[in-house]
Image (cartoon, grey):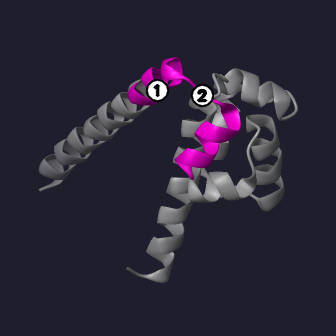
């Protein structure tokens, strides 16, 4: 994997990790945006699709009540232990992953459709 591809993957992982921890904590994108200075949930979504600055990562980690290292490494045990999360949150995790899989499947179908149109 090229260095550029590795960096892109790292950014995708970072965004997914933030979303995962956000859902575990029961914080909506709107609430996260409010705590980030009153930005909209659409702005939060856009922020997560771009490279996240170190300062922003620290602020997001504070809001999510974890360290930036937890977000970067998605140490699920640390998140669960730190937040003392119970069964309800496991259901939320499953919902998050199911939604993520559906989104990825829709993206694949859309890309395949575009590919076959252009072929």
- Bounds of the magenta span? 75-94
Observer-nearest residue: 78 or 23?
78
Report, in whole angstroms, how far the alpha carbon at label 2 lies from the one at label 1: 8 Å
* Residue nearest the observer in this picture, 71 or 31: 71
117 over 93 or under it: above or below = below
Q: Residue at x 54, y 46 (%)?
A: 76
- Give the structural element (helix, strand or loop) at label 1: helix
Image quadrant in which the N terminus is located: bottom left
Position of residue 88 relative to residue 11, above or below, is above
Residue 66, horizontal then vertical, whole percent? 73, 44
**Camera-nearest residue between 18 and 81:** 81
Q: Which residue is mark 1?
A: 90
Q: Is residue 112 left or right of residue 78?
A: left
The image shows residue 25, relative to residue 108, as above or below, that is above
Disc 2 packing (10 Å; few <14; some 14–19; many ≥20):
few
- Residue 85 got which mark? 2
First reached walking from the N terminus: tag 2 or tag 1: 2
Indicate yes or no whether the magenta region holds residue 79.
yes
């Amino acid at each position: 994997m090229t260095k550029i591809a590795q960096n892109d993957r790292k950014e995708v992982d970072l965004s997914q990790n933030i979303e995962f921890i956000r859902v575990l904590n029961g914080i909506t994108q709107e609430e996260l945006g409010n705590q980030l200075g009153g930005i909209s949930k659409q702005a939060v979504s856009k922020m997560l699709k771009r490279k996240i600055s170190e300062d922003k990562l620290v602020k997001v980690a504070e809001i999510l009540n974890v360290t930036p290292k937890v977000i970067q490494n998605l140490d699920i045990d640390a998140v669960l232990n730190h937040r003392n999360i119970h069964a309800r949150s496991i259901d939320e995790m499953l919902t998050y992953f199911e939604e993520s899989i559906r989104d990825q499947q829709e993206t694949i179908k859309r890309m395949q459709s575009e590919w076959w149109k252009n072929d």
